Amino acid sequence: MAGQCPWKQLILSALESNAHVKHSSYFQMATIGYNGRPSNRTVVFRGFEENNDKIQINTDSRTRKIDELKHCPFAEICWYFTDSWEQFRITGKVDVIDSSNSDPAKLQQREKSWFASSVRSRLQYLGPNPGLPCLSDKSPHELTLDPSSGPVATFCLLLLDPDQVDYLNLKADKRIMFALKQSADGEMHWYEERINP
């Protein structure tokens, strides 16, 4: 993809101006369920993939969203920054990088994301299957993990590759639609259009 991504700086600025608000790193992610209905949940922003604009999300490979993404790889996130009154709706295709991935470079990304997470965060992947009935009273705090060991099989890295970003700034009464399109030269470029809020 040619050129600088115009919306990425808006997100980085929003993250910076809302850094004191703990929930600023959380956003909602919607996928399409097997029944054709939307399926939504809150996830944590884990940064942008190095040297590009893909959004990183860590998750458990046993969650419903993994099956939904393997069935239909498209998702939309909605990210609202409460202090700056900015909303980003970002759509794109999601690459699921789990332990069965055969690409060494992707497995390396997965491992890097694993070690970038806190040990407490990593422990959640050792617990029982998310979404299934609770059959034990055992506390997740009783689990242990060697901090130097690599990712467990249930750890999964998601990479959302945006193709459209709908940016709304309520304080400035401004809305911009960014769309990734192929230009006459065959290259993919971001185009932006100011639209009514």
Image (spheres, rainbow, N blue to C red):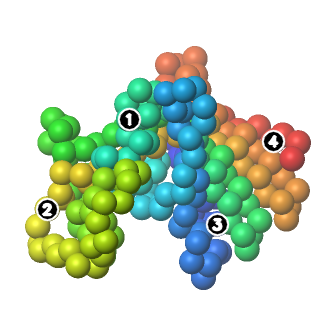
Q: Which residue is mark 2?
A: 150
Instruction: Work out whether mark 1 precedes mark 2 in sequence or the reverse, and give the earlier one.
Output: 1
Residue 142, how many percent across, how many down? 23, 79
- For label 4, the SS is strand
Specify whether 67 is left or right of 31: left
**Disc 4 residue crowd, few under 14, some 14–19, many 20+, Cα 10 Å:** few
Q: Which mark is residue 194?
A: 4
Q: SS class of the residue under badge 3?
A: helix
Return the x and y of residue 31 as percentages of the image width and height. Answer: 53, 38
* Residue 54 visible in the picture: yes
Q: Amino acid at mark 3?
A: Ala
- Spatial CA span between label 1 and label 4: 36 Å
Q: Is residue 35 above or below residue 31?
A: above
What whole-number distance in Å separates the C-alpha atoms at marks 3 and 1? 32 Å
3 and 4 marks in contact (CB < 8 Å): no
Residue that lies at the very extreme toward the bottom in this rendered image: 20
The answer to whether mark 1 and mark 4 are in CB contact below 8 A is no
Asked if disc 2 and disc 4 are in contact, CB closer than 8 Å, the reply is: no
Q: Is residue 78 left or right of residue 83?
A: left
The residue wearing badge 1 is 67
